[in-house]
């Protein structure tokens, strides 16, 4: 999925499940985002090697990765062995974070994060999650916590994957919800 926002070319995808080399990244990409499920259950040493080699060589001033449910090491307390790999390759690993990428403020949120309403930032341009918000392109499997966050933060765009069957975009209020799953 391509979009231009604040003069930056953004390309985002999710759910390649190891078939990342089939994704063609435009040469003029400024910000490249993967919203998880880049690998298939990464519990073996070296499972990220091919993805990290490929992703770090793609166009973009920034390469951002948000873990998905198939990045199991992030869910079973083994993330400390994986996090340094992303930094080594110059990839920004975002886990429940907000950062400014050359004027575009991007936030990430895990599927089960509960953030008190008073701590939800309202200056996010693009929210990236692996899971969809409840009731929006979610095939019945969305997160109520993510929906609450989006309704309070009101980003211009909410990019997510996880649900392979419901690709597309839906505008609700001022938020453009886009399922960026590429799984075939």
Image (tube, grey):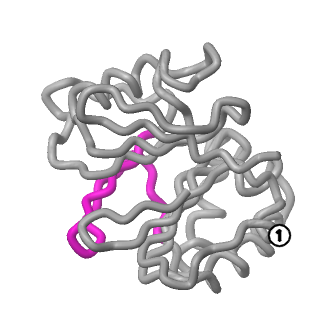
Residue 13: percent from the left, percent from the top? 60, 56
- Residue hosting label 1: 46
Tally of marks: 1
Residue at the image point whose x is 56% and y is 51% from the top: 35
Comparing 6 with 21, the one in front is: 6
Image location of residue 46, percent across then percent down: 82, 69
Predominant secondary structure in magenta? strand
The part of the image, by quadrant, that contains residue 21 is: bottom right
Residue 4 lies, in percent from the top left, at 36, 65
Q: Vertically, is 50 above or below 178?
A: below
Q: Is residue 162 shown in magenta? A: no
**Residue 145 percent coordinates (x, y):** 40, 22
Looking at the rendered image, the quarter that the N terminus falls into is bottom right
Please name whichever residue, 11 or 122, is drawn nearer the observer in this view of the structure: 11
In the drawing, does residue 79 fall left or right of residue 164?
Answer: left
Name of the residue lying farthest toward the right: 44
Q: Residue at x 26, y 42 (%)?
A: 155
- Please say if 55 is above or below 133: below
- Identify the residue at horizontal 76%, vertical 65% (top origin): 20
- Relative side of 59 to 102, left or right: right
Q: Is residue 31 above or below residue 124?
A: below
Label 1, secondary structure: give it.
Answer: loop
- The structure residue drawn at horizontal position 49% and vertical position 41%, both measured from the top left corner, is 178
Residue 94 among magenta residues = yes
Vertical side of 91 occupied by 158: above or below: above
Magenta stretch?
92-109
Q: Residue 68 lies in what quarter of the image?
A: top right
Packing grade of label 1 (10 A; few <14, some 14-19, many >=20) is: few
């Amino acid at each position: 999925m391509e979009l231009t926002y604040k003069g930056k070319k953004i390309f985002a995808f999710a759910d390649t499940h190891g078939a990342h080399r089939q994704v063609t990244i435009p040469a003029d990409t400024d910000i490249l985002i993967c919203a998880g499920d880049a690998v298939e259950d990464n519990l073996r040493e070296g499972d990220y090697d091919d993805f990290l080699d490929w992703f770090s060589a793609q166009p973009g001033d920034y390469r951002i990765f948000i873990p998905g449910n198939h990045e199991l090491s992030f869910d079973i307390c083994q993330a400390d062995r994986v996090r340094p790999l992303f930094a080594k390759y110059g990839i920004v690993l975002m886990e429940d974070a907000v950062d400014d990428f050359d004027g575009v403020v991007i936030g990430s949120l895990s599927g089960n994060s509960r953030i008190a309403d008073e701590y939800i930032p309202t200056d996010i341009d693009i929210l990236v999650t692996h899971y969809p918000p409840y009731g929006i392109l979610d095939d019945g499997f969305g997160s109520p916590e993510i929906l609450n966050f989006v309704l309070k933060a009101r980003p211009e765009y909410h990019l997510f994957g996880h649900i392979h069957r419901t690709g597309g975009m839906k505008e609700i209020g001022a938020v453009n919800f886009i399922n960026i799953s590429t799984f075939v």
